[in-house]
Amino acid sequence: MSAVALPRNLIAPPVVMGDDRVKTSSVKILPANANSTYSPTSGNRIVFNVPAYAKSFINPQRTYLSFNIKKTGNQADSRLVDGIPWIDRLDLKIGTVMCESLQNYALLERMESLYETADHAEGRAWLNGDYSDVLRKYTDGATTPKSATILDKAIADQHNGRAFTKPLMSGIIGKGQEFYVPVGMLNASGSQAMQLELFLAPNDQVVTRNTDVTSSPGYELSEVCLNISVCELPERALKAFNSAILSGGSVKLPYKTTRCFQQHVPSGQQHVTMSVVENSKDAEKLIIGMRPQAKVSGYTTTNVNGSTDDAFALRGGENSGSVVSKMTIRHGLQQFPPAPLEVRDNTGTTPFILHGLASCDMLNRSTRLTSIDIDGAPVYENNGFFIAQGFKSSNDGIENALDTASGGSPIEVMLDFSAQNTPLSMFAYVRSNYHLNIGSTGAVRMTEGSH
């Protein structure tokens, strides 16, 4: 008789009992440089020392920042930029080893958020302080009653101070890390496992000021906490872990981290070549965003009660004033895609967006990037355009991305513009795979690649 299959819902399998001696607890870590408030002009960095909890691990999926933020200045003068991008740089040290240094953090945070779904962002608006999707939904280009109500409440709360949360983009203890981090082993420096250092962004990058306002509104943070979930193993389980994992001399924790490269493009220049010199054995993704230079180091002044324009409005789309018409990405003899991508004038930039989604295995996802804006155009044609290039040959947990460490060749990015009327700053982020090797003495070293 041939084999047959039955529905798996036909019968419930027995539940495997977990070890009731595994203890999980939520811990709030306060800044080591404790201040009542933090601002770009006073206490412009926040330092967290994460203890080496004995026999314990951190669950990064339950780790996040919480904070209270207050906008300074007159209430109607300004509002906080969507997403509250107050982190300018993130450094993570373990002992004397700098494991991560994420530069231009806020821009990367914005572009990554555009790959989320609109429903996800809308549902978290009051947690993350990003109201852009809600406003697109409830406005027709002019301020309508519901969007006006939302904005009025948001601006009033920002003036009085309100609590928000922010996930971390750290590859080691951030939202992208799927494995527990063995902080109990990171005790080479004594009681401290790691140090997380956050640098605050300038006022003009976090606050948008209202039309005709010439003053300099700002912001201040208070009650900043690093919230972590600590999992403590019983002695028997810890012995089994040490026997199985440490037999090779170290624990290998895989993680992804990102490096940023920057270049300026003068107004009117319609061709640009950018060389990204990244030394990585397994570079899996390149993301490029372009911002007007005036927004990188100055206030954005606009109607804060209706406009979605802010310091992180991106250029490259059809309605942005700096329209990308051709793209070539090359490393050595390899070209991505194999032939240059080109679009004709006034036909939109959809091919660039589709290529980015496909190469990053996101072609069938509904993203904020492709949502409809209040004028009927997609977000990427207005102020959400960026270039993404995935280098993995398939979305598997194997080392199959781009080796930029061999051969000495940079990643070359060549762009043509059909229009370019604004001086731009180009930011290129390369995401690569690494391993954190934790020895039995708590010392760490980084190795490149997925394995």
Image: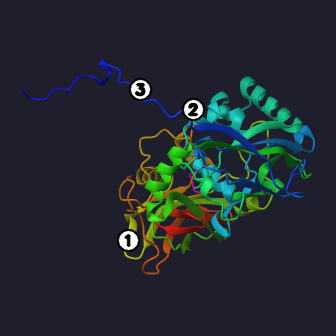
Q: Closer to the camera: disc 3 or disc 2?
A: 3
Per the rendering, the mark at residue 92 is none
| Frontmost residue, 335 versus 252 | 252
- Do the residues under discs 1 and 3 have CB atoms within 8 angstroms? no
Percent x, y for residue 147? 72, 28
Q: Which residue is mark 1?
A: 334
Mark 2 secondary-structure assignment? helix
Percent x, y of residue 73: 92, 45
Q: Nearer the viewer, residue 316 or 9?
A: 9
- From the viewer's side, name the closer residue of 198 and 208: 198
Give the quadrant of residue 20: top right
Q: Is residue 347 visible?
A: no
As drawn, the residue found furthest toward the top would be: 10
- Is label 1 or label 3 in front? 3
Q: CA distance from mark 1 to mark 3?
A: 51 Å
Amino acid at circle 1? Gln
Q: Is residue 121 above or below residue 205?
A: above
Residue 451 in the figure: left or right of residue 74: left
Mark 2 lies on residue: 119
Q: Which mark is residue 15?
A: 3
CA separation, marks 3 and 2?
34 Å
| Quadrant of the image occupied by residue 364 | top left
Amino acid under disc 2: Asp
- Does the rendering let one see residue 345? yes
Furthest-left residue in this view: 1
Mark 3 or 2, nearer chain start: 3
Is 306 placed above or below 212 here?
above
- Quick one: quadrant of the N terminus? top left
Q: How was the colour assigned to the protein in this rendering?
A: rainbow
Q: Which residue: 9% across, 29% down? A: 2
Which one is earlier in the sequence, the residue at label 1 or at label 3?
3
Residue 317 on the magenta span: yes
